[in-house]
Image (spheres, helix red, strand yellow):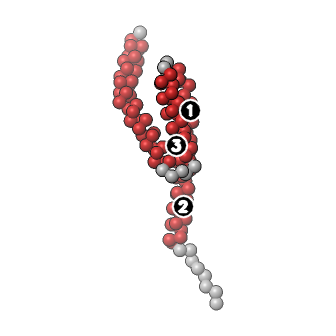
């Protein structure tokens, strides 16, 4: 007599977890590549404002770190995901305090242009 095996519920959940894991990995890789691409697109406007060689060197080093850690994170290098997340968070925290002033300045300019 042959025995038939029924699909185990645990096996089905493991397959679903694997599918979710693959989806989240693809989503992460897409986000990393978009961030690296955006970083490259920003380079030209950022270099236009830099007038000193020190600022250009710092900008080049930052771009190298962001793109290097991004490529390493996509390539599944150990600790690269955490490093990339830290670098992105640190850069966001570095610009956050200046955003309020920029919004106020932009709002005051829009009020001036509406009066003219």
Label 2 crowd bin: few (<14), some (14–19), many (20+), radius 10 Å? few
What's the residue at 61%, 85% (across, down)?
3
Question: Pointer 1: what residue?
Answer: 40
Q: Which mark is residue 115?
A: none
Question: Pointer 3: what residue?
Answer: 69
Q: Earlier in the sequence, mark 2 or mark 1?
A: 2
Between the C-alphas of marks 2 and 1, the distance is 33 Å
Element type at marker 2? helix
List x then y, in percent, for residue 54.
48, 24
Q: Nearer the viewer, mark 1 or mark 3?
A: 3
What's the residue at 42%, 40% (across, down)?
89
Question: Pointer 2: what residue?
Answer: 18
List x then y, in percent, for residue 82.
45, 48
Label 1 crowd bin: few (<14), some (14–19), many (20+), radius 10 Å? some
Q: Nearer the viewer, mark 2 or mark 3?
A: 3
Q: Earlier in the sequence, mark 2 or mark 3?
A: 2
Q: Nearer the viewer, residue 23 or 112?
A: 23
Above or below: residue 100 compared with residue 36: above
């Amino acid at each position: 007599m042959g025995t038939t095996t029924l699909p185990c519920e645990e096996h089905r959940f493991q397959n679903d977890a694997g599918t979710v894991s693959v989806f989240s990995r693809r989503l992460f890789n897409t986000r990393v590549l978009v961030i690296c691409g955006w970083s490259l697109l920003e380079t030209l406007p950022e270099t236009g404002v830099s007038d000193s060689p020190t600022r250009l060197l710092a900008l080049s080093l930052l771009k190298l770190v962001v793109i290097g850690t991004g490529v390493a994170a996509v390539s599944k290098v150990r600790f690269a995901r955490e490093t990339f997340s830290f670098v992105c968070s640190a850069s966001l925290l570095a610009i956050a305090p200046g955003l309020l002033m920029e919004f106020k300045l932009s709002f005051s300019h829009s009020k001036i242009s509406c009066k003219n």
